[in-house]
């Protein structure tokens, strides 16, 4: 095991964890998770990512790096009126659909029929409300947020992958140094998995489970496979969907949402500097898995530390973390002229947060986009 493999795995894991862990905590809070359920969520999803990365890398002999669904966490955090048990039911559905996509080819083809612009518009609508909170947070806490934003912009010029992690570190330091946050008791409790019996409510399955599956597939798995192809590897698509979907369904019983292929963090583990022999580069997946086990065990300590931060500071960190994904979603949504209006309709309805018949805005945004696109397509053909 070369040192370069270990360093690449450590950096990739810290970037993935540090840049979006606050979003996962926000998702848990939106479902009313107890502290024990939140700690179980973090531990379960870390272990699922570790197991999947190690298994797929060792089996396929290529560096397969997994992530938790960041857009999925944003989708969950934007919901309201859903219990933790109902959320678990939605997570189970999303995991099962991902696994079935690797087994049943017609299901994969059906998802592929959704226009890229509409899928991207739905993702942009989910992310936009979180990014809009960055401005009010800067007004509420200028002494904390503005230096953090400045460092984010400076680091992003040199290394975009580390920008959010650097901003989070500075935000933590400033919050505790200035007294804006009180340093909690940092005892290290032993993390435990907490079983959560799922509850299945049809409107939650449609309003959260189905959109969670769609955003995970469109914004995480597909770019993850493309990243592997760009690095010269043939991704094990069906095996990866089966493993990530199965592990997502299993970890859902302990509160975790979906895991998926990684794109940005995967790029850190695929370069020639990781290992000059590309046939041995798959071992980075084992090192990556080991780091995620460690992060899972440290979860209660990290969660306690972040819970002490002011709410506006957390909102600013989340907004910074989602600016990159929002840019990609907006670019994809309006890239094709024929889909732009439908994408705008999808974005508008999704970002509105409207709920009808107990079903959330992401589902209605998808419906609105498909209806508009179908109407425009028929009109164009006539």
Image (cartoon, rainbow, N blue to C red):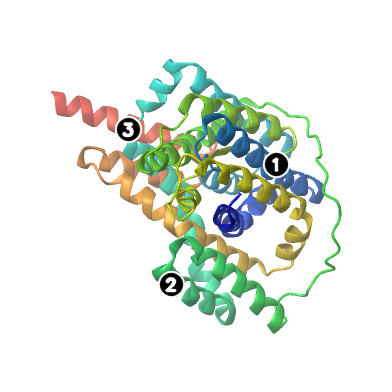
Q: Which callout, 2 or 1, points to the residue nearer the camera?
A: 1
Q: Nearer the viewer, residue 31 or 146?
A: 146
Confirm whether residue 183 shows in the render: yes
Q: Disc count in the image?
A: 3
**Disc 2 to disc 1: CB gap under 8 Å:** no
Depicted 249 relative to depicted 228: above or below:
above
Q: Which mark is residue 153?
A: 2
SS assignment at label 3? loop
Earlier-in-chain disc, 2 versus 1: 1
Confirm whether residue 358 shows in the render: no
Q: Position of residue 178 (x, y in %)?
A: 69, 83
Q: Residue at x 59, y 57 (%)?
A: 3
SS assignment at label 2? helix
Q: Position of residue 149 (x, y in %)?
A: 49, 73
**Disc 1 to disc 3: CB gap under 8 Å:** no
Q: Residue at x 69, y 69 (%)?
A: 309
Q: Mark 3 — residue? A: 115
Earlier-in-chain disc, 3 versus 2: 3
Q: Mark 1 — residue? A: 47
SS assignment at label 1? helix
- Mark 3 Cα-neighbour bin, 10 Å: few <14, some 14–19, many ≥20: some
Q: Which callout, 3 or 2, points to the residue nearer the camera?
A: 2
Earlier-in-chain disc, 1 versus 3: 1
* Residue placed furthest toward the left: 382
Depicted 233 relative to depicted 2: above or below:
above
Q: Residue at x 37, y 27 (%)?
A: 112
The answer to whether 143 appears left or right of 378 in the picture is: right
- Mark 2 Cα-neighbour bin, 10 Å: few <14, some 14–19, many ≥20: some
């Amino acid at each position: 095991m070369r040192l370069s493999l270990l360093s690449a795995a450590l950096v990739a894991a810290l970037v993935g964890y540090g840049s979006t862990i606050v979003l996962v905590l926000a998702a848990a809070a939106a479902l009313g998770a107890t502290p024990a359920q939140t700690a179980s969520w973090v531990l379960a999803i870390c272990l699922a990512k570790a197991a999947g990365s190690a298994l797929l890398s060792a089996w396929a002999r290529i560096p397969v790096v997994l992530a938790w669904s960041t857009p999925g966490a944003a989708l969950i955090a934007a919901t309201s009126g859903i219990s933790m048990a109902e959320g678990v039911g939605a997570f189970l559905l999303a995991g099962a659909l991902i696994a079935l996509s690797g087994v049943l080819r017609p299901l994969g083809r059906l998802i592929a029929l959704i226009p890229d612009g509409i899928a991207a518009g739905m993702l942009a609508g989910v992310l936009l409300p979180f990014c809009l909170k960055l401005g009010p947070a800067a007004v509420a806490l200028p002494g904390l947020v503005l230096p953090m934003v400045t460092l984010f912009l400076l680091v992003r010029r040199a290394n975009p992958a580390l920008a959010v992690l650097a901003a989070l570190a500075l935000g933590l330091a400033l919050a505790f140094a200035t007294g804006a946050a009180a340093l909690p008791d940092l005892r290290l409790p032993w993390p435990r998995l907490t079983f959560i019996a799922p509850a299945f409510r049809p409107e939650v399955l449609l309003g959260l489970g189905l959109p969670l599956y769609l955003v995970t597939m469109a914004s995480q798995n597909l770019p993850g496979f493309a990243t592997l192809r760009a690095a010269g590897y043939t991704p094990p698509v069906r095996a990866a969907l089966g493993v990530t979907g199965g592990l997502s369904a299993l970890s859902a019983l302990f509160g975790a949402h979906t895991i998926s292929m990684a794109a940005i963090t995967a790029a850190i583990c695929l370069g020639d500097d990781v290992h000059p022999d590309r046939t041995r580069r798959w071992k980075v997946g084992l090192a990556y898995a080991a780091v995620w086990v460690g992060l899972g065990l440290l979860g209660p300590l990290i969660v306690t530390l972040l819970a002490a931060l002011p709410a506006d500071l957390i909102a600013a960190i989340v907004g910074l973390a989602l600016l990159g994904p929002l840019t990609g979603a907006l670019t994809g949504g309006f890239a094709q002229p024929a889909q732009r209006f439908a994408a705008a309709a999808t974005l508008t309805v999704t970002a509105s947060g409207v709920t009808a018949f107990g079903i959330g805005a992401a589902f209605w945004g998808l419906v609105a986009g498909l209806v508009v696109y179908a109407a425009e397509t028929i009109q164009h053909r006539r």
